């Protein structure tokens, strides 16, 4: 995905440089910066697991989400269909946070019907960790 974004950025840059007289330098620079901004916001997904929370951070850290572990009632391994896509996707029954692949962990929170899916390339490890923390936090 990153390779595709970089290719599109190069094509945009070349097109902007050739059309400077028609559109002006300011628009050319803007056309180059918008894809770079989007790429910097979504080029990676960091997942930080602790006994108190699960924290997600996209790209450079502007977009964040956290879940309190004590509110998690269930976790399951799921496979999202390819047409769901990447980034942050809002589906009628869940919200997906993903940057590549189709493997994800779906978590259900207390008092909420909406579920949350966290895309990962190592679902077994994260699933086992979340399950162990849920079991240890039960009274």
Image (spheres, rainbow, N blue to C red):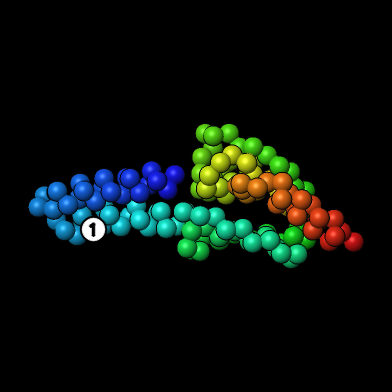
Q: Residue furthest right?
A: 139
Q: Is residue 92 visible?
A: no
Instruction: Give the quadrant of the N terminus.
Output: top left
- Residue 76 lies, in percent from the top left, at 74, 43
Residue drawn at x 17%, y 52% as measured from the top left: 17
**Residue 55 occupies quadrant:** bottom right
* Residue at the spot of label 1: 29
**Residue 29 occupies quadrant:** bottom left
Q: Is residue 14 visible?
A: yes
Judging depth in this view, the residue of 16 and 124 nearest the camera is 124
Please tell me how crowded label 1 is: few (under 14), some (14-19), or many (20+) other residues with Cα within 10 Å.
some
Residue drawn at x 71%, y 50% as measured from the top left: 125
Please indicate whether residue 55 sits to the left or right of residue 58 in the image: right
- Residue 121 lies, in percent from the top left, at 61, 46
- Residue 28 lies, in percent from the top left, at 20, 55
Judging depth in this view, the residue of 121 and 69 nearest the camera is 121
- Number of dots carrying numbers: 1
């Amino acid at each position: 995905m990153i390779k595709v974004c970089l290719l599109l950025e190069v094509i945009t840059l070349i097109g902007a440089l050739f059309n400077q007289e028609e559109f002006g330098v300011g628009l050319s620079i803007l056309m180059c910066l918008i894809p770079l901004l989007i790429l910097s916001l979504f080029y990676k997904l960091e997942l930080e697991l602790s006994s108190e929370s699960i924290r997600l951070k996209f790209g450079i850290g502007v977009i964040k989400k956290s879940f309190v572990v004590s509110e998690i009632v269930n976790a399951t391994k799921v496979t999202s269909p390819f047409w769901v896509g990447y980034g942050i996707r809002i589906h009628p029954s869940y919200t997906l946070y993903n940057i590549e692949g189709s493997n994800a962990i779906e978590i259900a929170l207390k008092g909420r019907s909406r579920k949350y899916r966290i895309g990962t390339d190592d679902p077994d490890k994260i699933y086992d960790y979340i399950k162990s923390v849920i079991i240890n936090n039960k009274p």
